[in-house]
Amino acid sequence: MLAIETRDLKKTYVSNKKSPGIKGGIKSLFSREKTYVDAVKGVDLTIEKGEMVGFLGPNGAGKTTTLKMLSGILYPTSGHASVLGFTPSVRNPEMLRQISLVMGNKMQLWWDLPAWDSFVVLKEMYEVDDAKFKRRVDNLIEALQLSDKVNTQVRKLSLGERMKCELVAALLHAPQIVFLDEPTIGLDVVSQKRIRDFLNTLHKEDNCTLLLTSHYMQDVQELCDRVVVIDHGTVIFEGTLDVLTSRFSDVRRIRLSFSENVSADEIAKYGKLIGEASDTAVVEVAQKNTASATAAMLQYLPVSDVSIEQVDIEEVIRSLFTEGR
Ligand SMILES: Nc1ncnc2c1ncn2[C@@H]1O[C@H](COP(=O)(O)OP(=O)(O)OP(=O)(O)O)[C@@H](O)[C@H]1O
Ligand SMILES: [Mg+2]
């Protein structure tokens, strides 16, 4: 069953051309000259119910624009989008009740109220019944360790605490699809990890569909079965992280432990030594030579343990972005 489908989805932002300065600002009010930004240039997505998909791309690639179109905030310029069988721009209440958009850099909670008060307003908006609300919010608050924070004015919370409250607010109506736009942006590594663990549990328990953007590869690695990479408004890759790394990187790293120290020269016979050699070493080899190099080292060096690693996903993504250009 499909959760999200788009075909040739496009968005062009149109704004009045503005010359610099105050005079320019006034002139632009009356000017007919427009500027056009083709933010999304024909995106095709097919996402099954229950999938966790990473939506990646450099700054300005069109990720937020796409998520806004999928959640019915922005009207597409052309193309087709279907979310749970609904056309998002119609903003059918039945659809809105089943989706949620969380933006790491934009708050939905009322700044001057305790988060709890916002939760209650949202409960009414989404018509969640009392018992369900209580169970759901209690669970969310416990999972995010927020019990002593929900009665404090939101403005007095730390960034991480606020983000967690945002998550509760976005999830209390138990949406089937959750769009997450950089949910961990600006958080320290411990809070990022908590949010990832929370999202993993949520996904398991609710069997919801998650479409997530992040510039942190750890998020993607821990959360996403599959990634869609866009650049300049077009999809440049779609598939699993494994396929992404194997397609865009032709090297592998072999990590070795030795029962006695081995010299750098000895290791260099088999591949490129990364860092220092002692009783452990990391050797980089061409992907096609992985098997033979590993076999040779096992035979000729005092190897006590070996593991083969793909290169860093961040490196892969970086090279993909530069190639894409
Ligand atoms: N309201 C707007 N009016 C005009 N242009 C816009 C508007 N919003 C976004 N853009 C432009 O559309 C393009 C895509 O922006 P978008 O916010 O979708 O990128 P993004 O992939 O989310 O980037 P980031 O990783 O920085 O969040 C950019 O060139 C941006 O400048
Ligand atoms: Mg964005």
Image (spheres, helix red, strand yellow):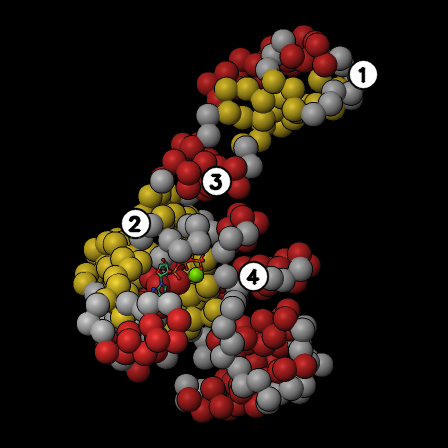
The residues tagged by marks 2 and 3 sit, at their Cα atoms, a distance apart of: 17 Å
Mark 3 sits on what residue? Answer: 318
Residue in view at x 23 percent, y 78 percent: 30
Q: Amino acid at mark 2?
A: Thr
Q: Is residue 48 visible?
A: no
Residue in view at x 31 percent, y 53 percent: 233
Q: Quadrant of the C terminus?
A: top left
Q: Amino acid at mark 4?
A: Ile
215 horizontally vs 158: left or right = left
191 horizontally vs 223: left or right = right
In the structure shown, which secondary structural element does the residue marked by tag 3 occupy? helix
Q: Are marks 3 and 4 in contact (CB under 8 Å)?
A: no
- Compared to residue 268, the image places residue 224 above or below, namely below
Q: Is mark 2 within 8 Å of ligand 1?
A: no
Mark 4 sits on what residue? Answer: 185
Q: Which circle's residue, 3 or 1, is located before the other in the chain?
A: 1
Q: Which mark is nearer the camera, 2 or 1?
A: 2
> Which class describes the residues within 10 Å of circle 3: few (<14), some (14-19), or many (20+)?
few
The residues tagged by marks 2 and 4 sit, at their Cα atoms, a distance apart of: 24 Å
Mark 1 sits on what residue? Answer: 260
Mark 2 sits on what residue? Answer: 234
Q: Which circle's residue, 2 or 3, is located before the other in the chain?
A: 2
Q: Quadrant of the N terminus?
A: bottom left
Q: Position of residue 321 (x, y in %)?
A: 42, 41
Q: Amino acid at mark 1?
A: Glu
- Compared to residue 170, the image places residue 268 above or below, namely above
> Which class describes the residues within 10 Å of circle 2: few (<14), some (14-19), or many (20+)?
many
Q: Quadrant of ligand 1?
A: bottom left
